[in-house]
Image: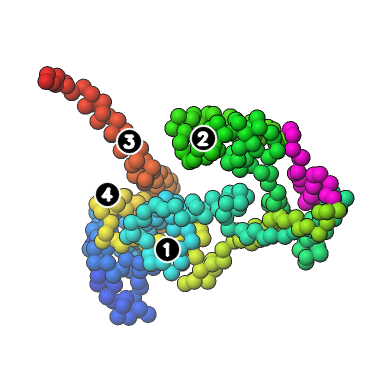
Amino acid sequence: MANIPIYTGSSNFTQSLNLYISNPNVYPSPTPFGFYDNDVQFQNDANSVANFCARRLGYPIENVELQDLNFWTAFEEAVTVYGNELYAYQVRENMLNIEGLPITTPTLINTQITPNMGNVIRISEQYGTEAGTGGNVNWYSGSVVLTGSVQDYDLDVWAQQNGISGSDLEIKRVFYQGVPASATYYYGGGIGLGAGFGGFFGALGGVAGAAGYGNNFLVTPLSYNVAAIQEMELANDILLSAYSFEIINNKLRIYPVPTEADSGTNYWFDYLLKSERLSDSLVSGSGVSGSGLITNVSNAPYTNPVYTQINSIGRAWIFEYTLALTKEILGYVRNKYSTIPIPGAEVTLNGDTLTSSAATDKEALIVRLREYFDQTSRQAMLERRALEADFAKQDLNNTPMTIYIG
């Protein structure tokens, strides 16, 4: 094996950091990225973690063919992996609440995020557009001029005449509504239907009758009013002219056929442009760093954790993951020198065993951490609280109740 210095049983992270700061061209950085080098607690734990890993790998009974830089590199990676797993979970938990915020939003690692309905409402705006009760797509008004004896009107032709692509036109509402029965409800006798209906509605009193407002409201069942309106609607359908329309593929057909007296009348409708339905669903903002909006998990403002703020539960996991990484590095080193000649024999090193064990340990630690995050999610905690409340009720039900005698 090459004659290179290996771990001597002690390390000094602060000294190595100061040497690197004073002369970076000569001395190596203690860690590859320096994410936590200035954290005093990280500096203190770095030496302890190196000692912990070396002893777990057999030092001082066996040499550990690593340097302090290897231990510190593994330590930095373990902290970063812990932060990545933690904040990846936080992004999944809160993405619906932070999507659309400016990318310049300060880091969220120490921010309590209260769930909000902002993006839920934004997502549901599409239904308002289709129902004509709001939404995020503009509706426009247009009209065709009626011509006597002409029943069918091609609105795609109308669109082209007005500079709109016919395939881009979608009619949302045509302004024809029959007289509602509730309007007739106000007038005894209806619309030329004779005294029979007048007597029916007039007998209601209140709004319909001549006796004033509300005289009989409390004694008239609601079902009676509904029956009256339904009777009027049925009478309108059967006895009155069926003024209506149908629209199929932007072809408007009017019933009955317009007469010459209808010529020149504007028949109004609402429409939207299909292209705007698509374009209005896009909000510009992603791309250039420092501008735009949070649009996906890659630009959510989560950074590396602050090591000092990680509690003992997190640090215990980090120490174990550091050991697994160190074991992996040592396995790679020993695989390069798989056998060492000695007088009369050869010694086979355990590089393969170390790398295989390290892979198993790393996977198990990641699985354990993710399961822990799942168990502490907002949903899981609310479910646990609900179960606790149910158990508390069951326990209280077993408590003897006193009998009160007045």
Mark before the other along the chain sequence, 2 or 1: 2
Label 1 or label 3, whichever lies nearer to me, is 3
Tell me the kind of residue under disc 3.
Ala
Magenta-colored stretch includes residue 252 = yes
Which residue is labeled 1 in the image?
301
| Residue drawn at (33%, 42%) of the image | 381
- Where residue 58 appears, as percent x and y from the top left, is 28, 50
Tell me the kind of residue under disc 2.
Gly
CB of mark 2 within 8 Å of CB of mark 1?
no
Q: Which of 112 and 253 is in front in this view?
A: 253
Magenta-colored stretch includes residue 35 = no
- CA gap, disc 4 and disc 3: 26 Å
- Where residue 157 appears, as percent x and y from the top left, is 83, 59
Residue 230 shows in the view:
no
Identify the mark at residue 386; answer none if there is no mark: 3
| Residue drawn at (30%, 38%) of the image | 385
Tell me the kind of residue under disc 1.
Pro
Quadrant holding the N terminus: bottom left
Mark before the other along the chain sequence, 4 or 3: 4
Label 4 or label 2, whichever lies nearer to me, is 2
Tell me if 99 is positioned left or right of 327 in this view: right
Q: Give the range drawn in magenta.
A: 238-259
- CA gap, disc 1 and disc 4: 24 Å
Which residue is labeled 2 in the image?
205
Mark before the other along the chain sequence, 1 or 4: 1
